[in-house]
Amino acid sequence: MSTSTRYWDANAFLGWLNDEQDKAQECESVLAAADAGKVQIVTSALTLTEVIKLKGKPRLTKDKEEAIKAFFENDYIIVRDVDRFIAEKARDLIWSFNGLHPKDAIHVATAVILKINVLDTFDGRLIKLSGKIGAPKLIIAHPHMLYQPDMYESRSEKSKS
């Protein structure tokens, strides 16, 4: 089974966790593919904290803590630490791309250093950088992918029941 890897910015997670109408639906295809083992979602450890409150968005409340923890424990979510190499790359990106904020630079740097080709976000400022960073060039867009469950997979799973 072939698996692809995508990077998710904190706002994709927050859109899903808050069930934001304009975002959650776009996340569903990626999450369905991830749940089926077709996609791995990578994010920075920074996301685990950042997801609680993004600037201009409602804060997630403490009663959602268990749901947040459980969601990030899915096998298809891979959390990467911010190390010196990522931090230095983020700093370089901030100097190279006027207006890139430090937290966003951490996300972009993590994707670039891990050689992930797709970064999913709802941040228009980041989307404008699509195709301008990394080698190969990082595609930055809304979290959407064409995914349809394999009918043969579904049949074989049903026959096991």
Image (spheres, grey):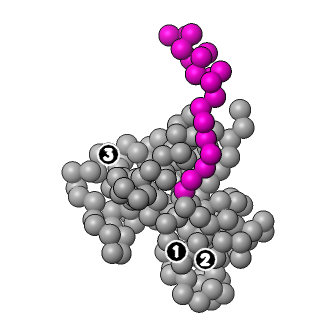
Q: Which residue has dot 2 on it?
A: 128
Q: Position of residue 88 (x, y in %)?
A: 63, 78
Neighbours of disc 3 within 10 Å: few (<14), some (14-19), many (20+): few
Q: Which residue has dot 1 on it?
A: 124
- Above or below, 144 against 53 in this view is above
Give the amino acid at mark 3.
Ala
Q: Which residue has dot 3 on it?
A: 67
Q: Position of residue 34 (x, y in %)?
A: 56, 41
Q: In this image, 103 relative to 92: left or right?
A: left
| Residue 119 belongs to the span the image colors magenta | no
SS at badge 1? helix
Q: Residue at x 46, y 59 (%)?
A: 12
Q: Residue at x 62, y 24 (%)?
A: 151
Q: In this image, 129 relative to 68: left or right?
A: right
| Camera-side residue of 113 and 85 | 113
Mark 2 touches mark 1? (CB < 8 Å):
yes
